[in-house]
Each structure stands twice: as structure tokens, then as C-alpha cells.
Image (spheres, rainbow, N blue to C red):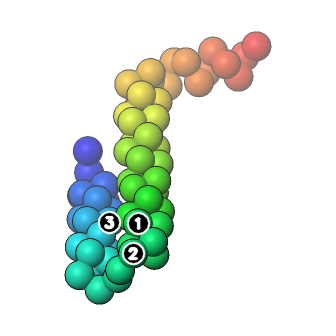
């Protein structure tokens, strides 16, 4: 994992905390859900990138030949 991922997760956490102390009711819940979905999307993108890096360049070269 890289620092960019950690910064994104930190930003989601900070925004969630700000929402906790500044918003009420349904808008706070909607904000948490929105931030949570973006956090999940960020984690999935990071996992996908890691999986692609583990495959290596040989898989890409084989795919282009077909």
C-alpha cells in the first residue's frame, strides 16, 4: 500500500468525524454512507491494482498476442 491510499483513508475518516460533530439526523447518516461507499471503492481499486502488479508484464504480453 502506498501513502496515497493512506491519505485517502485519512481524509474519509476526517470527513466522517466532521460529519459526526456538525450534522444531525438523516443528512449525517447519508454522509456516512456516501463516505463509506467511497472508502470501499478506494479499497477495491487498491486491491485490483495490487493484483494487476502481481500478475506481471508476461500476462499483458500474452494477451496482446492473441
Which residue: 63% across, 15% down? 62
Q: Residue at x 49, y 25 (%)?
A: 57
Which quadrant of the structure image shows residue 12? bottom left
Q: In which quadrant is the C terminus drawn? A: top right
Question: Disc 1 versus disc 3: distance between alpha carbons?
Answer: 14 Å
The quadrant in which residue 36 appears is bottom left
Q: Secondary structure at mark 3?
A: helix
Name the side, left or right, on which 1 lies relative to 60: left
Indicate which disc residue 12 carries. 3
Find residue 11 and report its horizontal and vertical position in percent.
29, 69
Residue 28 found in image quarter: bottom left
Between 57 and 26, the residue placed more toward the observer is 26
Residue 14 is left or right of residue 62, and the answer is: left
Q: CA distance from mark 3 to mark 2?
A: 19 Å
The CA span between labels 1 and 2 is: 7 Å
Of all residues shown, which one is farthest toward the bottom?
22
Residues at circles 1 and 2 in contact by the CB criterion of under 8 Å: yes
Per the rendering, the mark at residue 19 is none
Q: Which residue is mark 1?
A: 29
Numbered disc 1: secondary structure: helix
Q: Is residue 23 above or below residue 33?
A: below
- Residue 5 lies, with reference to residue 11, above or below; the image says above
Residue under the image location 67 percent in, 19 percent down: 63
Q: Are marks 3 and 2 in contact (CB under 8 Å)?
A: no
Q: Is residue 1 above or below residue 27?
A: above
| Residue 11 visible in the current orientation | no
Question: Residue 23 location in percent, x, y?
Answer: 35, 82
65 sits to left or right of 45: right
Instruction: Residue at 46%, 35% (x, y): give it.
Output: 48
Q: Which mark is residue 25?
A: 2
* Whether residue 43 is situated above or below residue 9 in the rendered picture: above
Amino acid at each position: 500500500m502506498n501513502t496515497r491510499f493512506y491519505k485517502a483513508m485519512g481524509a474519509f475518516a476526517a470527513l466522517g468525524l466532521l460529519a459526526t460533530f456538525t450534522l444531525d439526523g438523516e443528512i449525517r447518516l447519508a454522509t456516512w454512507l456516501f463516505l463509506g461507499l467511497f472508502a470501499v471503492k478506494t479499497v477495491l481499486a487498491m486491491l485490483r491494482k495490487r493484483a494487476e502488479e502481481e500478475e506481471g508484464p508476461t500476462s499483458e504480453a500474452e494477451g496482446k498476442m492473441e
